[in-house]
Image (cartoon, coloured by chain):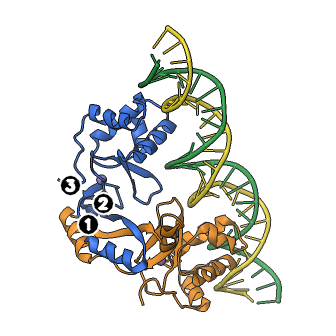
Chain colours: A orange, B blue, C yellow, D green
DNA sequence: GTCTACTTGCAAATGATTTGCAATAAGGGG
DNA sequence: CCCCTTATTGCAAATCATTTGCAAGTAGAC
């Protein structure tokens, strides 16, 4: 399956990755990875913190580190709060979401528009290493009823 | 031309729109519209404020009002700061940007992927009134050289 | 010109995220 | 297993964008 599948890696594998980057395997870091490993949708730092027993600042610092190590990916739903998802071993994690404007339900979206468009835009303006950020918003089935 | 064209409306026209919404034509509101009218790229509340002589809070309040009146559109480049563009009379302002990751240069992009994809995603998950937010990021010609 | 509701300025409050710093713990070497 | 150096943590304070309470000011109707 695609990007929105649970990275089925175990903690051992994850700590191995941490070690590779010459980082220390600390309690908070392992716990954060465990929490993320169980979720299928991106979590906010606060949501992660609620399931843990360490300082919020530590959660933020760890997430930033894990992001730099490409072990987690940051998403932005435009509500001023970052969300994070665990990345698989050799996964760049590029994918999108469909978010309910009413209840914030999240649906993982693997599809994307043809890379053609992005390439054309890059060429057209002489930009290099172009990437994009795309999220969909709408009303989920439940919220349409209400 | 497309969405990224200057709304060539004059202030009279703009104040007329304000009046339609039973809002008062105040100094700050006119000034904000004047500032936005001269720009071709989205501006932050702070940037607008720098060109004015009223309180920053007033700028935020006015922008929110103008947004609700569909006279300005809010954009999010993922840097935690909202940006605003003036909207043309009957323009929903839907368009995208290509932003340099290095110097923040902005290029207006009128193109978009086929509405087909959006429709398919909506149907597939039973969502209604689906819209999307899409921005491109890359290295502009200048920043590639350096 | 008067009157009233809508607006503004100013200061304080918010909320997410970051940072300084002293206390603490991880992992290599002995 | 102990020690030592250095990375990491907890806590509190600082940032930053944006919002909000409130008293003073003003646009627009009469
Ligand atoms: Mn996802
Ligand atoms: Mn634009
Ligand atoms: Zn919903
Ligand atoms: Zn650039």
Query: Chain letter of disc 3?
Result: B
Q: Indicate whether B49 appears above or below A129.
A: above
Residue at figure coordinates x 63%, y 83% from the top left: A34
Residue neighbourhood size for the residue with mark 2, other residues' Cα within 10 Å, grouped as few (<14), some (14–19), many (≥20) = some
Residue wearing tag 2: B96
Q: Splitting the image into four quadrants, where does ligand 4 fall?
A: bottom left
SS class, disc 2? strand
The verdict on label 2 being within 8 Å of ligand 2 is yes
Q: Are marks 3 and 2 on the same chain?
A: yes
Res. B76 image quadrant: bottom left
* Badge 1 and badge 2 in a common chain: yes
Where residue A43 sits, quadrant-wise, is bottom right
Task: Check the image and report above or below for A21 versus A125.
Answer: below
Q: Quadrant of residue B115?
A: bottom left
Circle on res. B2: 3
Residue A144 point in image, percent of width and height: 47, 68
Sooner in the amino-acid sequence: mark 3 or mark 2:
3
Indicate the chain on which mark 1 is placed. B
């Amino acid at each position: 399956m695609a990007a929105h599948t649970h990275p089925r890696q175990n903690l051992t594998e994850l700590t191995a990755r941490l070690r590779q980057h010459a980082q220390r395997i600390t309690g908070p870091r392992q716990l954060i990875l465990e929490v993320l490993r169980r979720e299928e949708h991106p979590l906010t730092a606060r949501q992660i913190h609620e399931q843990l027993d360490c300082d919020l600042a530590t959660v933020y610092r760890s997430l930033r580190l894990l992001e730099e190590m490409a072990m987690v990916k940051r998403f932005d739903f435009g509500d001023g709060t970052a969300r994070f998802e665990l990345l698989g071993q050799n996964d760049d994690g590029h994918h999108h979401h469909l978010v309910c404007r009413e209840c914030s339900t999240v649906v993982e979206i693997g599809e994307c528009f043809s890379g053609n468009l992005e390439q054309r835009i890059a060429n057209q303006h002489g930009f290099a290493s172009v990437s994009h950020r795309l999220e969909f918003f709408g009303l989920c089935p439940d919220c349409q009823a209400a």
